[in-house]
Amino acid sequence: MTVEARKRPSFTIWILAGIIVILAAALIGILLFLKNQPQPERGVAPIREIEPLDPDSQNWGINFPNQFSTLLKTKDNNSPTTFGGSAPISKLEADPRLVTLFAGYPFSIDYNEERGHMNALIDVRATKRVNETTAGTCYSCKSSNNPKLWSEMGMAKFDSTPFSELGKLIEQPIGCANCHEANTMNLVVTNPALEEALQARGKDWRTFTRQEMRTVVCANCHVEYYFAGEGKYLTYPWEKGTKIEEIVDYYEESGFKDWEYPGTGTPMLKAQHPEYELFTADSTHYKAGVACADCHMPYTRDGAAKFSSHNVHSPLLAPDAACGQCHTDVPLVVGRVATIQAQVNERMLAAEDALIDAINALKAAAAMPGVDEAKLDEARTLHRQAQMMWDFIAAENSMGFHNPQEALRILGKSTDLARQAQLLAVQAAGDTSILAKTP
């Protein structure tokens, strides 16, 4: 074989290698070109530009008529479920034990079932719990005016402004600006208290996925919170964590109290509506990647258009749309929900009975001369913790279904602590006859 013949294959390999390099470079160039092209617009161009933080949902509705028209339905979707819904029902009449449990606090005077988003502003102004000393903080979860006011005033000034004065600046109920960024429609955290609470947990919501945000935006409002200091600064007690024991520990260290229970001297806590905390405490649906909006704002269609319904309400009022997205046997699911809620309700009422027994024992012991004050203080601490744990489930809007196992665990612990408080009160009095003297 000649030298030229031996060199020919090597020459061919170099030609092929060159061709491959040229093709690879061309492919990279094409990909870079495509990546740097402007993103195509989704759907039709908006009819009007929305001003940042615009509180008037009607303006947003021009671009998003399906979402806006379903939001309006929350004004009239006043339908009850077995253990909730959005009918204007007095919880005090439905369960008279609450009058005793909240004695000395405005919730013993007026405590109604929450209605739809479009009624939030009407209802907060109508409640008998509001008076001339009420702080502006009570408007925090009631209006789409809030994000703009927080931006302009800062939350500290917003919260410290009297309710009656702040109300002059507020005219819109809950709406688009509470959850969305104008024009992009991205889901955003608008409540400064939520931003601060997430930061305290080392979390940045801007790194969350869209599916995660479909739960996180609900935490702008549907959470446990309290008013801190003289300025009534809105604060989420998440510094230690979001589970009930971590929240109770936070309150114990801070020494915060909502009121003092009359006749017992117990520094009490009132839970708000901790839907986010209960749901995210490793519930079955949460671990499966389900978001609040999947069930409470299910996707629906208007012709070929698919959109998330903004008629936010109990999934039980439209189970085919809510549950049927994942479950094929909707009647079975609805029956399962009924069983779970009935079980949680039974445990909840048992906890209420235990708390009332503890309250009566504490009252009797506190009125006796020579009572052991140290033991009585221990009983008060247990009463405070037991009622907060019961209220964590009672004030949460799902009768435990958002996290059945956790709800039953918490109610069981509440009952146990209440019975311990009752026994400690007897020991403090040194007289078992106080049990016979209580109602």
Image (cartoon, rainbow, N blue to C red):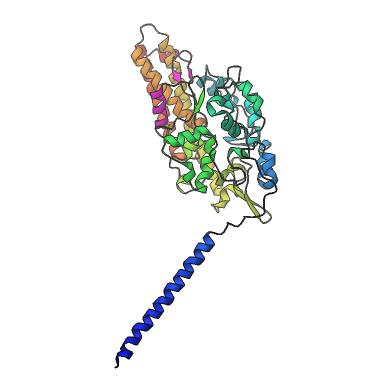
Please state the horizontal and vertical placement of residue 196, each as a whole percent of the image.
47, 33
Which quarter shows the N terminus?
bottom left
Write the residue at 47% across / 32% down: 347
Looking at the rendering, the stretch of residues picked out in magenta corresponds to 246-273
Q: Is residue 405 visible?
A: yes
Name the residue furthest bottom: 1
Q: Quadrant of residue 385?
A: top left
Residue at position x 47%, y 16% in the image: 261
Identify the residue at image location x=54%, y=28%: 155
Q: Is residue 349 above or below residue 375?
A: below
Residue 59, horizontal then vertical, whole percent: 69, 41
Residue 255 lies, in percent from the top left, at: 41, 21
Instruction: Judge by depth and name the residue closer to the eye, 123 or 15.
Output: 15
Choose top left, top right, bottom left or bottom right for residue 242: top left
From the viewer's side, name the closer residue of 392 and 138: 138
| Horizontal arrangement in the rendering, residue 377 relative to residue 269 (left or right) | left
